[in-house]
Image (cartoon, coloured by chain):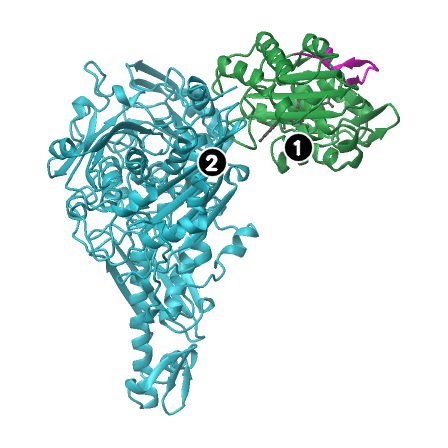
Amino acid sequence: MSYSFISPRDEKELKEEISAPGSFTMSGGTDLLVKIRMGKISPQKIVSTSKISTLHFIDENDDEIVIGSTITHAELLEYKPLREAFPVLFDAIYTIGSPQIRNRGTLVGNVMNASPAGDGLLALYLLDAKIEISNGDAVNIDEFVVSPGRTILPKGEYVKSIHIPKSKWDHHYFEKVGQRNSMTISIVSIGWLIKCGSEAIENLRIAFGSVAPTILRLKDVEKFSKGKKIDEKFVHVVSDMVKERVNPIDDVRGSAQYRKKLCSNLMYRMVEEGIKC
Amino acid sequence: MNVREERSVATSLSSDKNFDVVNTSVEKIDGYALVKGKPVFTDDFDVPDSLIVKILRSPHAHAIVKNVDASKALELSGVACVLTYKDVPRIAFTRAGQGYPEPSPYDTFVLDKKVRYVGDAVAIVAAESEEIARKALKLIKVEYDVLDNIIDYEHAMDENAPIIHDESEISGAYDPKHNIASHYEMHFGDVDEELSKCDVTTEKTFYTPNQSHAMMEPHAAISYFDANGRLTIITSTQVPYHVRRIIKRIFGVESRVIKPRIGGGFGGKQAVHVEAYVTAVTLKTGRPARCIYTRKETMTASNTRHAMRFKIRVGADKDANLRVIDMQGLSNTGAYGEHALTTFMVAGSKTLPLYNKVNAVRFMGDIVYTNTESAGAFRGYGAPQGAFALDCALDELAHKLGMDPVEFKLKNSIREGETSPVFKVMGEGREGVEQIVGSCKIEECAIEGAKLFNWHEKRERQRIEGTKAHGYGVAFAMQGSSIPAIDMGGATIKMNDDGTFNLMIGATDLGTGSDTILAQIAAEALHTSVGKFVVYSSDTDVTPFDKGAYASSTTYVSGNATKRAAERMAREILKAASEITGESVEKLHLENGKVISKSGKSLTYSEIQTQLFYTFKQRQLEVTESFVSEVSPPPYMVTFAEIEIDLETGKVDVMSMLNYVDCGTPINPLLARGQVEGASSQGIGMALYEEHIFDKNGRMVTDDFFTYKVPSRDDIKKITVKFADSYEPTGPFGAKSVSEIGLDTPGPVIANAIFDAVGIRVNRLPIKSEDLYFKLNERGLTP
Ligand SMILES: Cc1cc2nc3c(=O)[nH]c(=O)nc-3n(C[C@H](O)[C@H](O)[C@H](O)COP(=O)(O)OP(=O)(O)OC[C@H]3O[C@@H](n4cnc5c(N)ncnc54)[C@H](O)[C@@H]3O)c2cc1C
């Protein structure tokens, strides 16, 4: 196991370096290095983005927040407007690993890792984020991620940034259920966003982690919820819908049956959280 | 006696208890070096020209090594040697670092032609660099004859089970043809008859799991010949003297074993792991050899806690007098019988005496071989396994009697001045010693603890509210302090002309703070401060013998040795001062680093030793004392815990835990608290999170910290530690042990609290959310 390590100074150099066969782009390395150690990948070259100043930024305008690819989780948590604009993203990132991991890991790395359990990724699904690729394309997150560990990013390209459109929500929720309380890989994770009308739900978005090959947005549940009042009866119905739609597998962290139960049970958190609309 | 009555436990201060240095929380003497990252650990030693040693390990759980072809590896430039079973002495030994003769069977070879678990050593590779060594590992071709295996220890004694130890050289094992490494049984009274006379009885089977020590520093050792050709081994061990003895047994060579600072052990380093491999390389090549285990090796190829199963029967009369305890056990020692018998016996000997009023006791069972990582010593050493079964069963009995479990357990537990026949019957792999309990503040622990925890008020509360259930549990525990009549520790104190002392001890500080507390003990006896002691531990060529750090013995045994040495040094100083001043010893006393006479004159220690060096009756003041105990005074503890269960997920959180501990005088209250908190955390891990998961071939899947989950800070929440006002007459300044006992209660206290919350009796650790969820679901407690 030996490879070279390169830190390009600008994006042009980056592009050249990553076009070579066997080269891997690295942001924080918290996924990449683990994979190397486990023998899952054996790179010939690691190309770090860390010294490229044009990738290190957070931009904000009336419509969106744009997060450069080298922004770490810790930097995002410290960026005051984030909590205000996207509390669900803040909550999700806050649960990632430990302070050490958040000091190195990036949101872009979390997206590229394309784990069905990715916490930042789940929030990005809820927020309809777009991924800006170095070839100029901007792709919706749910089209960008294909399957565990796989995205549509073309070879020789890199991710420049993540665009998150601003939207107003009255309630947000994020939870991961794991055996342990932190530094844990969740058995199931859940997030939702709710906008209330005068009497009922105006808009709802809901996503689950670790229950399908990718993060799962349940768009038909979302559609069904429009105009409904949140009460025991409603939750009962959606929790049944959820149970039918999630498709988890058995693994060492939990059985499929348990995961299904968790997903439907977690819907009751809506009532417990005292959400009225 | 009703614990609900307003009563307090009288506390008395013994006159001995006016301490200057002892019973104060002085700073750890090596604390700054550690936080500054100073080179203190084995891996920090740079021995020039070292070969890097790697071990080729078996991918099979049970196989015969038919052929090892190392020719390709040896062709690789930079490979110094590849050793197989043909190249190392065929001497059966035990890796267990115990007193001699060891109560563990001799069933292990440095390398063998048979491998007995995934991870067992097949070949030793030494190369100029780690990279070359790794490459060489890949180039070795091994032909295996794969055999049937046993992964589940409940099937180890099945009729057609494969025989794991069929080697002719094995000795000390009970019945290896049936995979039984050890067997033990004892009883007094007739348990069946007593049970038949009881008004209430409980019978249940309890399971405790394997557990990894998960110490921060992995196993590591370096060996080399010094300039004079003496074999020297630097190793991260809890037992340097046992290492020296075992290396001599295997290789026939004398050696010097140096133990630097250890980065945690928890019993995992009470064994010979790496030392034999590096020694084999140094003997073969003449060159220094260094081997640092990876985390994976530390997880899968060192030691684990013995998983145990206990079928327990207990019974009481209608007046809540506990009359009988019957425990029938099965313990998994894995591939080798390290600590097999003794950990099993401790499951009884460090739990049963707590309930000394019974008419009949039986404790028996088998310790079996399986094709899994060898079990070994692990903090608690069987007591947590036994305590889980016993305390949970008593909890259930109290419930059946309609009695507060605090009251029931307290009513039936041992008191100061009493004894238990178990002390005499059960020792460490043999008979024990009779002892009268000289200090036992279990009443204070239970009664004051209940008040502090708000036990009675909390038990009035609603248990299930919405989707959360709350439960309150209590567990009682005891441990020991040292292995009596077997384990010895020594201490040497040398006085210097600058007024400092060298305190040289064989005791091994593995993070516990023993270097610090031994200095406190010496400083107390010599009427000076901790800063005046230069502590050195341990180096078999320099420091006196000590059995090592295990069996909750360092404070008690090494502490008593240190106290004796310091007291003798005090007498030597007084004698010298009397000679110098011409005043009689009776007129002199020690105070604040000086000898002071009734006439008002004073001499500093520095002045005395300077005169003794250069001008007056010249000599070096130096003393060595040893200590071996006739008894093993148990510390006691009562733990209260509140848990919360999420009924929608089955997840259990330990919201708060109160440990009320009687450890005699805590020599250093802060460090003692740290020991209890640490043990509680490890116990919470064992109870809720830590699990060895195997694939179908017997490979441990949970071989790193990604998959093997020790509790994080968020899982610990609030642990409170309170010390009872206690003084052990045989202990150094009244001290007993405190390092292991904290691990005995988390399992039962959490299980008891779950029962209190939802009426479900969990009988298997770790308690997994998923399993609990489905049990809750069966009872209709989930949404
Ligand atoms: C101890 C530990 C705990 C963890 N806990 C969590 C957790 O709780 N929740 C969670 O979701 N994750 C967790 N992770 C996973 C990981 O930390 C996150 O996924 C993190 O966000 C990855 O970011 P990174 O910058 O370190 O990625 P890297 O490791 O640098 O990269 C990840 C992948 O992205 C690619 N990549 C990186 N940058 C770019 C780019 N600019 N363009 C294209 N491809 C790129 C890499 O080639 C690699 O394939 C944990 C990891 C560890 C080690």
Residue that badge 2 annotates: B643
Instruction: Give the quarter the ligand 1 occupies.
Output: top right
Q: Is residue B637 left or right of residue A99?
A: left
Give above or below for A120 relative to B130: above
Residue A227 position within the rendered picture, expressed as x and y whole percent measured from the top left? 75, 12
Residue A4 position within the rendered picture, expressed as x and y whole percent measured from the top left? 66, 27
> Do we see residue B231 in this rendering?
no
Q: Is residue A215 left or right of residue B99?
A: right
Secondary structure beneath disc 2? strand
Q: Which chain is green?
A: A
For marks 1 and 2, give the CA distance: 25 Å
Q: Residues within 10 Å of mark 2 (few under 14, many from 20)?
A: many
Q: Residue at x 87, y 23 (%)?
A: A63
Out of A35 and B731, give the one closest to the viewer.
B731
Out of B369 and B612, give the one closest to the viewer.
B369
Q: Which mark is residue A94?
A: 1
Give above or below for B733 relative to B647: below
Residue B191 position within the rendered picture, expressed as x and y whole percent measured from the top left? 14, 34
- Amino acid on which disc 2 is placed: Ile
Q: Residues within 10 Å of mark 1 (few under 14, many from 20)?
A: some
Q: Which residues are magenta?
A: A129-146
